[in-house]
Amino acid sequence: MSWFGKKQPPPTRAPIHHAPPKLTLSLADAAPVGVADNVLLLTERADPLPPDPAVSAPPPPAVKAAPPKAAPSPLKAVAADSYWTQTRIDAAEFLWGEDNLGPGDGAIAAGALADLPITVASQVLIASAGLGGLSRVLARHYGCWPTSMTPSAALAGIAQQRSDAAELSQKAAVTAYDPATAQFKANSFDIVAAHEILTPVANKARLMQQIVRAAKRGGTVVITEMVMTELGVASLGGTSRRSAAAGEALQAWLKLMNPTPQLWSHAQMMETFFSLNVDAASKNISPAYVERINKIWGELSGKLEAGTIPRPLLPTVATDSERWAAFRTALDEDAIAMTRYTIKI
């Protein structure tokens, strides 16, 4: 064996023992790793024995230029969101379909705008864009340029990437915002759509005022929201057997929700619209949600029997299934209702 180009080995010498370097790995500061992440772990190893001082070491290898940084992954945006992790998004789309995060997305959300006179010139504000599916539908079908916003920076990042891939970067752009501090430009939109956006907000009256003022004179505001029914309110006191059953269903669902929804009653919603000097027509659309959940549950049973649910998604799909089942029970017991409010400005 040659030793750095010499035919003879170096003189015998006592071995030098090197203690292996200590390497402390901490995952406390690491971003959550999604199922689609590729993870490379780099570790140190002890240096080999140094060569004989009398023998010159070979020149170090040329240092190659660092490769250009790859484009940011959507997973990095998701990791910044404490709720919408990549696994949760994948599980939601597995249950409800592409671009859908719940039963109210897709056809139900689009149905809220189906009868409105949308044209290529319409100014539309979507205050709950999610993954941007409805925004892209409006841009493609009507040719308009909706102003699309979502409370999650993670969802906004992925929605924008999907709009980029669909060559709708500007036409269906999606940005993040904070509903608690939002200030929409007054008298600016022909149509304002707010889909399930009020539930987590403490100061609902303020956000409702911002949503209403954003519409032009002659425009339309459509708000779809989860509210407590009269029976749901009565269930807080358990004044009857029926209200007690509604209360049990409501509490069972709330225990599965994190963060806990800050529910208003239908009466509180109507009182707030009255204080804003607008008339709101309301419609209970809970049956559409129940029908959607029942349909998905039937399909899910088949997928479970066939073993086609991706293994990494199984825990989240199971958790979400339990939560949506409890939600459906609360709807069935008339403790809560999905209600659509339509306001002509």
Image (cartoon, grey):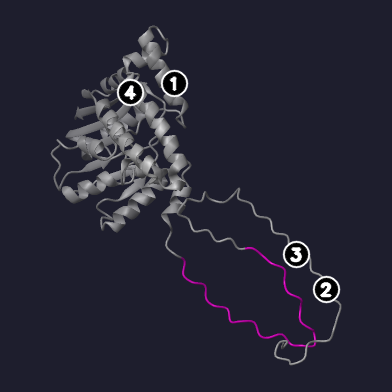
Looking at the image, which residue is at 33% across and 27% down?
A: 226
Percent position of residue 121, x then y: 15, 47
The residue beneath circle 1 is 251
| Residue where numbered disc 3 is placed | 20
Marks 4/3 in contact by CB < 8 Å: the verdict is no
**Circle 4 is placed at which residue position?**
331
Q: Is residue 138 left or right of residue 262?
A: left
- Assess disc 1: are there few (<14), some (14-19) or many (≥20) residues with their C-alpha within 10 Å of its C-alpha: some
Q: Are marks 1 and 4 in contact (CB under 8 Å)?
A: no
Query: Which amino acid, by three-letter code, is at mark 1?
Result: Gln
* Residue type at tag 4: Leu
Residue visible at 17% across and 48% down?
141
Q: Amino acid at mark 3?
A: Pro
Q: Secondary structure at mark 3?
A: loop
**Is the magenta region chiefly helix, strand or loop?**
loop
Question: Which corner quadrant of the image does residue 43 belong to?
Answer: bottom right
Real-space Cα separation, disc 3 to disc 2, in angstroms: 12 Å
Dot 1 or dot 3: first in sequence order is: 3
Residue 83 visible, this orientation: no
First in residue order: circle 4 vs circle 2: 2
Say which element carries label 1. helix
What residue range appears in magenta?
43-69
